[in-house]
Image: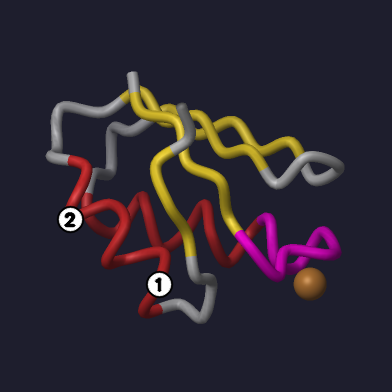
Amino acid sequence: MLKLKVQEMNCGHCVSSVTKAIKKVDPNADVQVDLGSGLVTVDTSVGSEAVRAAVKDAGYPNELAA
Ligand SMILES: [Cu+2]
């Protein structure tokens, strides 16, 4: 389970962009987005660096959440 703190998400469109970007890396990923806190929880077998890069490339800087 991967937890990312994602910046610059502020509407439902952002949520779907981030979700799509992650699903491109892992179509089977389970993605939960909490818009209020910017916390994205991903259940995936793909490594965190690949997921983080995909989210960043979609326009959303992010870091691993503690
Ligand atoms: Cu948005």
Q: Name above or below for residue 30 compared with residue 18.
A: above
Q: Residue at x 70, y 46 (%)?
A: 38
Q: Residue at x 64, y 63 (%)?
A: 7
Which label was assigned to residue 50?
2
- The N terminus: image quadrant: top left
| Residue extending farthest front | 66
Whether the residues at callouts 1 and 2 have beta carbons within 8 Å, the answer is no
Q: Which of 29/40 is in front?
A: 40
Q: Is residue 47 left or right of residue 1?
A: left
Q: Name above or below for residue 27 compared with residue 13.
A: above
Q: Residue at x 75, y 68 (%)?
A: 13
Residue 30, image quadrant = top left
Q: Residue at x 79, y 45 (%)?
A: 35
Q: Earlier in the sequence, mark 1 or mark 2?
A: 2
| Residue extending farthest top | 1
Boundaries of the magenta span: 7-15
Q: Whole-Å distance between the Cαs marked 1 and 2?
A: 10 Å
Which label was assigned to residue 47?
none
Image location of residue 64, percent across then percent down: 39, 41
Image location of residue 14, percent across then percent down: 70, 66
Q: Secondary structure at mark 2?
A: helix
User: Badge 2, how many Cα within 10 Å: few under 14, some, many 20+?
Assistant: few
Ligand 1 lies in quarter: bottom right
What amino acid type is highlighted by mark number 2? Ala
Q: Is residue 8 located in the magenta-colored stretch of the structure?
A: yes
Q: Name above or below for residue 16 compared with residue 43.
A: below
Q: Secondary structure at mark 1?
A: helix
The residue singled out by tag 1 in the image is 56
Mark 1 close to ligand 1, CB under 8 Å: no
User: Badge 1, how many Cα within 10 Å: few under 14, some, many 20+?
Assistant: some
Image location of residue 63, percent across then percent down: 43, 52
Q: How many marks?
A: 2
